[in-house]
Amino acid sequence: MCSLEYFRDFDLESMDITLKFRQQEYGDVNCVVWDAALVLAKYLETLYVKQYTFFVSKRVLELGAGLGCVGITAACFGGDVILTDLSQNLQQLQCNIDENKLHIKGNAKADALKWGNKLQAEPFDILLMADCIYYIEVIEDLVKTMVDSTTPETLILISQEIRDTDKQKTSWEMFTNTLIKYFTISYIPEDEQHPIYRSSDILLINAKKKCL
Ligand SMILES: C[S@@+](CC[C@H](N)C(=O)[O-])C[C@H]1O[C@@H](n2cnc3c(N)ncnc32)[C@H](O)[C@@H]1O
C-alpha cells in the first residue's frame, strides 16, 4: 500500500511518453523528485536522441535513487537498471517503478544499497547519481561504493544542485576532493545539456575512474 499524495509528470518527448512520479507532501529527502534528477534524466535523453541504442543492454546502477526519476528514464531507453536507496525507501521507489512499468523498454529493479557497501561483483557500464551530496558523514562511504561499482570504462554521471548553505558547500568541496583521488572529472557545459532542463546552480559531472 502506497500512502502517497500527488503526481509529478515528466515528459520524455523523444518517446512521446509521460512518466508519473508519486510524491509526498511531507517526508524525508526522498519524498519528491529533485531538480538535479530532472536535469540528469533530460541529459540522458540527449544521449538517447544522439544514439537510440545508447542504453540498450547496458548495466546501469543508480545510487540514492529516491523516487527513481533518473533510473526509470534510463530503463525507458533500454537500460538494465538497478535503482538503489536505503532499505526504508524501497517501497516508495518500487511504487514508482510499478507506476511507469508500461514505458520501460529495458529493466528496472529496486534494491537496497547503503553507501559504503557493494551490490554485486560485476562492475556497471553506467553509474548515475542525482542530488546525493548534502551531508559530509557519508561522503567517504559514497565514494567507496562508486569505486567498488565501476571500472575505467564505466560512464559516471553526477548531477548536484549547489544550495546556498555552509553545510552543502562543505559537503560538495569534501566530495570533489575525495572524488578526484580516484576519478578524473569534467563538468558538462550547459550548452551540451538539455536546452530547457539545465540550470546554473545544478552541476553536471562526467567522471572516469583512474587506472591506479
Ligand atoms: C536528495 S535525495 C535525491 C533523490 C533522487 N536522486 C532525486 O534527485 O530525486 C538523496 C537520496 O539519497 C539517499 N541516501 C542518503 N544517504 C544514503 C546512504 N547512506 N546510502 C544510500 N542512500 C542514501 C536518500 O534516501 C535519498 O533518496
Image (tube, helix red, strand yellow):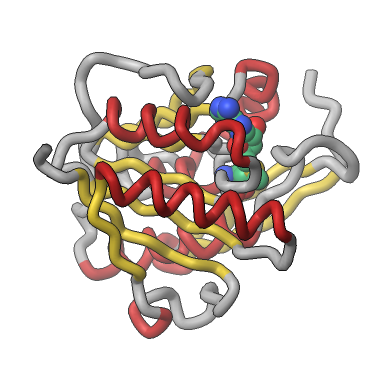
Residue displayed at 70% across by 52% down: 167
Q: Nearer the viewer, residue 102 or 178?
A: 178
One can see residue 98 in this view:
no
Left or right: where 158 falls relative to 91: left
Q: Nearer the viewer, residue 143 or 46?
A: 143
Residue displayed at 45% across by 22% down: 116
One can see residue 120 in this view:
yes
Quadrant including the C terminus: top left
Residue displayed at 57% across by 47% down: 133
112 over 135 or under it: above or below:
above
Q: Position of residue 67 (x, y in %)?
A: 63, 39
Q: Nearer the viewer, residue 74 or 88?
A: 88
Left or right: where 124 falls relative to 111: left
Quadrant including the N terminus: top right
Q: Position of residue 178 (x, y in %)?
A: 39, 44
13 over 87 or under it: above or below:
below
Q: Image quadrant of residue 28?
A: top right
Q: Position of residue 20 (x, y in %)?
A: 65, 48
Q: Position of residue 37 (x, y in %)?
A: 55, 55
Left or right: where 67 falls relative to 159: right
Q: How many marks?
A: 0
